[in-house]
């Protein structure tokens, strides 16, 4: 019987660099230090010769087909980072690979399905939308049908979109192809701290059962690669391929600000891992006129109510705006002086990159890969156990005038634009798929 899944979450923590196993065309050896993307966005080195030709199967002129399973996808947006990660992969590599994406027919928390048809092209990928009552049958049918060369699973704990296909694979009921699993931060200490007993018991049971045996792990950083090996052993095949950024945007307009005032933005799902309650508590004794604009779906209603109660006691003006569609995220970040995100952990932190690209100065915890920000004059990444450091940074932001903020804002945008334009970041993801497809062989698997 398939082990029961704990609830989904995601994050990342600083750790020493590690050495990864060679996986085909990917030379996956760590070249990063513990400062992450803030100091060195090139976390690993990849064979730069990997090209679109490497994404063909067995010399076939036809591109490989990646059957991709994910809980939520476009046009949804409330599911957060994994949606943007996959959309960016399709945007960068959709001309070289065929992505067939299988997902729910509605957004996170919605009772009604999307208005469009049930099967269509979205952003360069074929997308199959499944209603709640047909998800497991539909996934089993697609997995039994030849026509895909690799299976790409975008969660560790998703009962329907990861554990169900892995169970069918374990018992030999699906078309046999290589499998890539992207944990999306779910193995980080910050993520495992929530419902810890259930998650750890599940991981032990799944490992003993062999549920993940033989998969290729995609880690978004050397830190996440270490977490995979910690749970699944040193022999696990791990390829470090950071989440892909969107194309760099034009420089944002210059910032204006008055000393003694501060407008902060918090843009994320409202659940305990994102630590909105911690953000509100840190604002309690900050001097000056402070506004915190909160954008995001209330994934945990009880927790959201707790945050609203804390907001009523705060010296700051805390405003809850609800979910913000993707096309407006840059706009709300440009309206803020700083992005305040003391998260318990992110494996990548798409919203951090979006803030940087919008020129919004980041004030983060040190539990994302975006590190070394203060040394670069961009922002702050601070330990959660040092609230006084957060309050000092907040006080500095309050006192800052328009010229000081504008200088930090420009440096933030330049740093993000350099990362978004780094061809090697895309090459590492291309190399991940190339290494997997190299051994796939057209039609090599059979349903049993």
Image: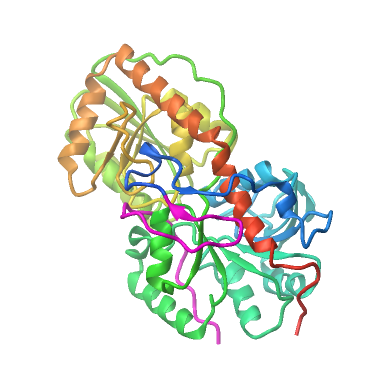
- Asked whether, in this view, residue 356 is left or right of residue 66, the answer is left
Is residue 388 part of the magenta span, yes or no?
Answer: no
Instruction: State which quadrant residue 281 falls in.
Output: top left
Observer-nearest residue: 386 or 116?
386
Q: Which residues are magenta?
A: 1-30
Query: Is residue 5 covered in magenta?
Result: yes
Percent of width and height locating residue 247: 59, 33
Q: Is residue 7 left or right of residue 114?
A: left
Question: Is 27 situated above or below 210?
Answer: above
Please state the horizontal and vertical placement of residue 150, each as a whole percent of the image: 69, 65
The overriding secondary structure of the stretch rendered in magenta is: loop
| Residue in view at x 43 percent, y 38 percent | 352
Q: Quadrant of the N terminus?
A: bottom right
For the C terminus, the quadrant is bottom right
Q: Is residue 82 above or below residue 3?
A: above
Q: Position of residue 140 (x, y in %)?
A: 72, 75
User: 236 or 209, which lies in front?
Assistant: 236
């Amino acid at each position: 019987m398939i082990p029961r899944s704990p609830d989904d979450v995601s994050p990342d923590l600083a750790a020493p660099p590690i050495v990864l196993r060679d996986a085909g065309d990917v030379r996956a050896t760590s070249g990063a230090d513990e400062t992450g993307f803030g100091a060195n966005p090139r976390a690993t080195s990849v064979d730069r010769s990997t090209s679109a030709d490497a994404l063909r199967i067995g010399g076939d002129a036809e591109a490989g087909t990646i059957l991709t399973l994910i809980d939520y996808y476009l046009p949804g947006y409330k599911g957060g980072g994994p949606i943007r990660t996959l959309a960016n992969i399709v945007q960068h590599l959709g001309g070289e690979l065929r992505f067939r994406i299988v997902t729910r027919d509605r957004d996170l928390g919605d009772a009604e399905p999307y208005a469009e048809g049930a099967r269509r092209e979205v952003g360069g990928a074929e997308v199959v939308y499944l209603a709640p009552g047909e998800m497991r049958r539909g996934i089993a049918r697609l997995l039994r049908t030849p026509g895909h060369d690799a299976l790409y699973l975008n969660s560790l704990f998703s009962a329907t979109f990861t554990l169900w296909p892995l169970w069918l694979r374990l018992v030999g009921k699906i078309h046999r192809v290589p499998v890539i699993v992207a944990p999306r931060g779910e193995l980080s200490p910050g993520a495992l701290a929530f419902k810890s007993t259930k998650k750890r018991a599940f991981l032990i049971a799944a490992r003993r059962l062999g549920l993940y045996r033989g998969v290729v792990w995609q880690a978004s950083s050397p830190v996440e690669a270490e977490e995979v090996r910690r749970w699944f052993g040193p022999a696990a095949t791990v390829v470090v391929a950071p989440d892909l950024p969107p194309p760099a945007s034009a420089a944002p307009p210059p910032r204006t600000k008055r000393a003694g005032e501060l407008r902060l933005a918090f843009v994320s799902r409202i659940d305990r891992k994102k630590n909105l309650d911690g953000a509100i508590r840190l604002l309690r004794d900050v001097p000056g006129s402070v506004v915190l604009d909160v954008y995001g779906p209330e994934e945990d209603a009880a927790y959201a109510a707790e945050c609203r109660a804390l907001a009523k006691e705060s010296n700051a003006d805390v405003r809850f705006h609800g979910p913000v569609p993707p096309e407006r995220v840059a706009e709300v970040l440009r309206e803020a002086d700083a992005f305040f995100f003391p998260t318990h952990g992110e494996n990548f932190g798409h919203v951090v990159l979006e803030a940087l690209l919008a020129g919004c100065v980041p004030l983060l915890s040190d539990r994302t890969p975006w590190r070394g920000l203060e040394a670069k004059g961009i922002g702050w990444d601070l330990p959660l156990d040092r609230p006084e450091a957060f309050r000092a940074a907040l006080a500095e932001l309050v006192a800052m005038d328009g010229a000081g903020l504008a200088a930090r804002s420009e440096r933030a945008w330049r740093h993000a634009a350099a990362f978004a334009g780094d061809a090697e970041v895309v090459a590492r993801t291309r190399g991940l798929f190339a290494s997997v497809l190299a051994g796939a062989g057209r039609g090599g698997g059979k349903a049993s």
